[in-house]
């Protein structure tokens, strides 16, 4: 059970979630579900064939029976929840490939699952969907996945409202991809629908498949910029680490934060972000790298 602890003075909240410390990591997968023998890559609980190693699924795209192979996207409750509703959205049966390498049709399925689960919980609270890609971004299992949490409405979220469109990287039919003037991270990229006033859960049809391509291209461009050495990163050129999240409310956006830097004492002590790359320059670089 998660406990919400208020700091009355600042209107901020902390979640105390002691169960989280028991979650598995790559070197300790045996603790996931000791009674189950895991067949997938290094015994990964998210691989096809290991469906019994997770709590029973709540959603799937694909053929076959629940909790058996055949799925293309699978959603299960998180065994180690931060909040009372906390789901894991497994991006595909593939243990390695994420958004930037999967077929765009699969990325559309992933976004369809996000959208459907958003709708399933929209009445229950504030629905946040986020992805930690790479161990250094906070993922505890490398099998590509996203997470969905529901936070009670009475809890104030310290989330950013949608930033004005500036420094456009891609101008698509329905979406802008851009680097806001107010970017806290180097090469931070936002994707926002051109039409204002909607929530992510409203996204349908052609817009959803369009968004799949837009999101994939944004990630590929950031990765390419890193591989070509156009970005200074604390990680090796081929270690791509990022987070993204989808804003929970009206005027939604997707915010991608590549982890090219570490945050440190100055930021912790001041609440100020130091961004060493001008967003105008980031947009120029990203626009120039071509996705073939
Ligand atoms: Zn796996």
Image: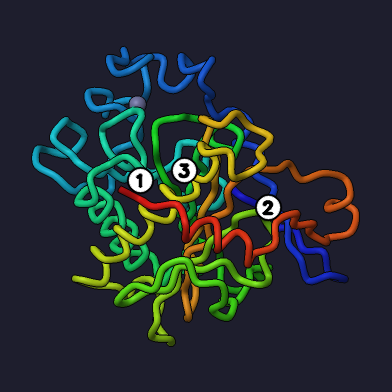
- Residue at 47%, 29% in the rendered image: 141
Q: Which residue is mark 1?
A: 99
Q: Which residue is mark 2?
A: 15
Identity of the residue furthest to the front in this view: 288
Return the mark for residue 224: 3
Ligand 1: quadrant of the figure? top left
Toward the viewer: 79 or 195? 195
Taking the image as shown, residue 246 lies to the left or right of residue 6, namely left
Q: Earlier in the sequence, mark 1 or mark 3?
A: 1
Q: Is mark 1 within 8 Å of ligand 1?
A: no
Q: Position of residue 126 (x, y in %)?
A: 51, 68
Q: Earlier in the sequence, mark 2 or mark 1?
A: 2
| Disc 1 residue crowd, few under 14, some 14–19, many 20+, Cα 10 Å | many
- Residue at 33%, 17% in the rendered image: 41
Dot 3: element = helix
| Disc 2 residue crowd, few under 14, some 14–19, many 20+, Cα 10 Å | few
Q: Quadrant of residue 12?
A: bottom right
Q: CA distance from mark 1 to mark 3?
A: 14 Å
- Residue at 33%, 34% in the rendered image: 97
Dot 2: element = strand
Q: Position of residue 221 (x, y in %)?
A: 44, 50
Taking the image as shown, residue 234 lies to the left or right of residue 163, namely right
């Amino acid at each position: 059970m998660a406990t919400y602890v208020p700091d009355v003075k600042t209107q901020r909240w902390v979640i105390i979630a002691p169960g989280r410390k028991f979650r598995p990591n790559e070197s300790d997968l045996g603790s996931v579900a000791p009674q189950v023998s895991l067949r997938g890559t290094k015994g990964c609980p998210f691989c096809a064939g290991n469906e019994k190693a997770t709590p029973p699924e709540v959603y799937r795209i694909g053929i076959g029976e629940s909790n058996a192979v055949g799925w293309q996207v699978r959603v299960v409750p998180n065994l180690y929840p931060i909040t009372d509703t906390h789901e894991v959205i497994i991006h595909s049966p593939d243990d390695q490939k994420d958004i930037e390498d999967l077929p765009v049709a699969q990325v559309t399925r992933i976004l369809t699952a996000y959208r459907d689960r958003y709708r399933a919980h929209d009445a229950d609270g504030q629905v946040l969907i986020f992805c930690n890609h790479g161990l250094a971004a906070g993922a505890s299992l490398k099998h590509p996945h996203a997470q969905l949490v529901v936070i009670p409405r009475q809890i104030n979220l310290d989330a950013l409202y949608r930033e004005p469109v500036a420094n456009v990287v891609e101008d698509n039919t329905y979406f802008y991809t851009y680097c806001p003037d107010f970017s806290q991270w180097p090469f931070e990229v936002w994707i926002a629908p051109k039409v204002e006033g909607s929530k992510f859960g409203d996204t349908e049809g052609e817009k959803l498949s369009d968004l799949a391509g837009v999101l994939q291209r944004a990630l590929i461009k950031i990765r390419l910029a890193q591989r070509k050495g156009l970005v200074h990163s604390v990680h090796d050129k081929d270690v791509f680490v990022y987070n993204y999240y989808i804003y929970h409310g009206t005027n939604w956006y997707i915010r991608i934060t590549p982890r090219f830097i570490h945050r440190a004492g100055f930021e912790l002590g001041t609440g100020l972000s130091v961004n060493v790359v001008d967003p105008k320059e980031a947009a120029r670089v990203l626009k120039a790298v071509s996705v073939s």
